[in-house]
Amino acid sequence: MIKFIYVIIMNLFRAPYLIPKMRREADHPEKYSEEERYDLARYVIRLMKLSGGIRTKAFGTVNLPEEGGYMMYPNHQGKYDALGIIYTHKNPCSLVMDKAKSNTILVREFIDLVQGKRLDKKDVRQALTIINEVSEDVKNGKRYILFPEGGYEFNNRNEVCGFKAGSFKIALKTKAPIIPVALIDSYKVFNSFNFGPVTTQVHYLKPILFEEYGHLKTQEIADIVRSRIQEKIDEVLRTESAPA
């Protein structure tokens, strides 16, 4: 949280220019292409990374399908998670976010720039509408980030909690590839007591195709995705802690 405030303060002088620019491009998709808006979002993330001493390494980008829509399901550690994915994901993608957390300054502009979806967890009908909208987008070739844990703990320490089965209804409706994404040390950026430089990791795992998960129940799919993410995190942490 301290680093988050620090990064905001360090970029305050840019706010009078950047926030209106983000707002303008988000409000006029007919004037600014998806690529232009996505590039602006990544540019703002780069500024935040530079001012905050944040480095993010990407692994497994070759696992991302070159064509068609797909769903990315990462573990959830904090405020930086989606930013780390967007920064390392070359092609435009969007995300589904908790509506209650999506309307603060800068967060609002980010969500609108990438045409993200705001999910009201307290409104079942609205949630169903969002699921249908995202499903249609994915069928039309769009890529989405959705956090199946639904939330995160402060100072997460790379713990992976249970995945909500309902998060995988979109995958079943679209028959699109599922990309498990393992985030490591992402919590250290804005959701810990760390203040110094930090390096996070984004691991894009091998796609799970419909042929592999189509006959399964949503809870079974959730367990498989969670298991693969946990295995990758354990593998990386085990390797890093091994003596040279």
Image: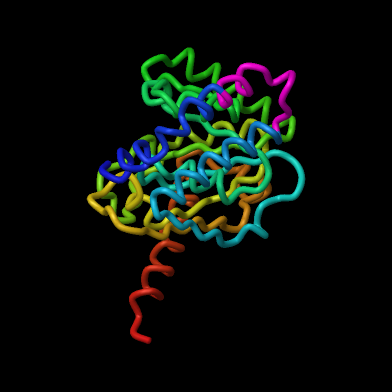
In depth, the one of 60 and 114 nearer the eye is: 114
- Residue 135 is situated, as x and y percent measured from the top left of the image, at 63, 28
Residue bounds of the magenta highlight: 21-34
Q: Residue at x 56, y 62 (%)?
A: 59
Would you place residue 85 above or below residue 22 in this image?
A: below
Given the current orientation, which residue lies at the most extreme front position? 13
Q: How is the image coloured?
A: rainbow
Q: Is residue 222 left or right of residue 137?
A: left
Using the rendered view, name the quadrant where residue 130 is placed: top right
Q: Quadrant of the C terminus?
A: bottom left
How many labels, in total?
0
The answer to which image quadrant residue 215 occupies is top right
Residue 70 lies left or right of residue 186; in this view the side is right
Q: Residue at x 52, y 36 (%)?
A: 168
Among all residues in the image, which is located at the extreme right?
67
In x, y percent, where is residue 193?
Answer: 22, 50
Rendered location of residue 182, percent (x, y): 47, 55
* Residue at x-position 41% and y-position 60%: 199
Furthest-left residue in this view: 193
Q: Nearer the viewer, residue 39 or 16?
A: 16
- How far across and down, in percent of the image, does residue 212 sit? 63, 51
> What residue is rendered at 40% in x and 33% in y?
12
The reply, left or right, for residue 129 in relation to residue 80 is right
In the rendered image, the vertical position of residue 23 relative to residue 43, given as above or below = above
Does residue 26 belong to the magenta stretch?
Answer: yes
Looking at the rendering, in which quadrant would you find the N terminus?
A: top left
Q: Nearer the viewer, residue 142 or 125?
A: 142
Q: Is residue 82 magenta?
A: no
